[in-house]
Amino acid sequence: MLEARNLYKIYNTGRKPLEVLKGINLKIEKGEFVAILGPSGAGKSTLLHILGGLDSPTKGEVYFEGINLYNINERERARIRNKKIGFVFQFYHLLPEFNVSENVYLAGLVDGFHKRREYREKAKKILSFLGLEERLQHKPNQLSGGEQQRVAIARALINEPEILFCDEPTGNLDSQMGELVLNYLRELNREKEQTIILVTHAEDLAEKAKRIVYIKDGELIRESLRTKIPT
Ligand SMILES: Nc1ncnc2c1ncn2[C@@H]1O[C@H](COP(=O)(O)OP(=O)(O)OP(=O)(O)O)[C@@H](O)[C@H]1O
Ligand SMILES: [Mg+2]
């Protein structure tokens, strides 16, 4: 479903070029639940953005369902993202002018405005499940960090994307809410066969995935596959 071939990302911000990704190769099948685990600064978010069609690599290719994502124009890429890809950003990126409900259901309207009622209801359902039914009218700056994180999760889920990228999705949640979110993701993966790629530096979180890919200094250093997943 998703394949990265020899990905490099080099930034020329400082005095010498910074190689953040150094030849990443990764293949993900439909329906997988993969955790990408690595220390801060390892290149996890950079990799996730490139895999999700949000940021082009300096070198290398990403194939999503057979399409070379960076060989098509931005419009086509955006269309694929809107229809098939969900993204939970590490720093949320909520729209500050819109309230919680709008932040979530507007993301569902890429198919057209006529579905707004349906999506507003759906947004309410997901947000209620995530404990935000009393916050629908709040603007992002009237929310706690963990609440904003949950809105970002709801927004990514509204379209029932085929593939969901989550960047530290529980980083700001307490352990109980973190567990609820993680179990929800696992359920989506099991029951709707949504492919999930979760980035984290928390080992206990990665442990819940069947496959763990370890990244360090921009390289995949190791992989582990488990047959038995702790509940
Ligand atoms: N736009 C940019 N310009 C220059 N350097 C960048 C840019 N974005 C990221 N970097 C650098 O690339 C490295 C990897 O960043 P990245 O955000 O991918 O790390 P990460 O593994 O997600 O870390 P964390 O766990 O802290 O979120 C960091 O050292 C960062 O400083
Ligand atoms: Mg990161």
Image: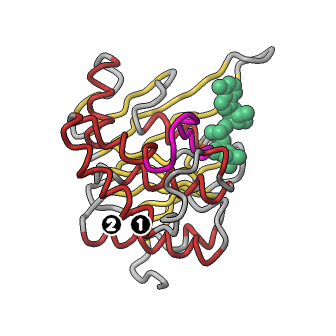
Q: Is residue 79 left or right of residue 24?
A: left
Q: Is residue 4 magenta?
A: no
The location of residue 134, given as percent across then percent down, is 53, 64
Q: Secondary structure at mark 2?
A: helix
Residue 13 figure quarter? top right
Badge 2 density bin: few <14, some 14–19, many ≥20, Cα 10 Å? many
Residues at circles 2 and 1 in contact by the CB criterion of under 8 Å: yes
**From the viewer's perspective, is residue 106 above or below residue 137?**
above
Q: Residue at x 33, y 61 (%)?
A: 32
Badge 1 density bin: few <14, some 14–19, many ≥20, Cα 10 Å? many
Q: Which mark is residue 185?
A: 1
Q: Which mark is residue 189?
A: 2
Which amino acid is tagged 1? Answer: Leu
The location of residue 192, given as percent across then percent down, is 24, 65
State which region is magenta.
90-101
Q: Is residue 42 visible?
A: no
Q: Is residue 7 visible?
A: yes
Q: Secondary structure at mark 1?
A: helix
Q: Is residue 105 left or right of residue 13?
A: left
The location of residue 153, given as percent across then percent down, is 47, 55
**From the viewer's perspective, is residue 75 above or below residue 26?**
above
Mark 2–mark 1 distance (CA, rounded to whole Å): 6 Å
Q: Residue at x 23, y 52 (%)?
A: 118
Q: Residue at x 80, y 14 (%)?
A: 15
Of the four image quadrants, the one with ligand 1 is top right
The location of residue 72, given as percent across then percent down, is 28, 19
Q: How is the image coloured?
A: secondary structure
Q: Residue at x 37, y 54 (%)?
A: 157
**From the viewer's perspective, is residue 171 above or below residue 190?**
above
Residue 5 figure quarter? top left
| Viewer-proximal residue among 35 and 158 | 158
**From the viewer's perspective, is residue 128 above or below residue 163?**
below
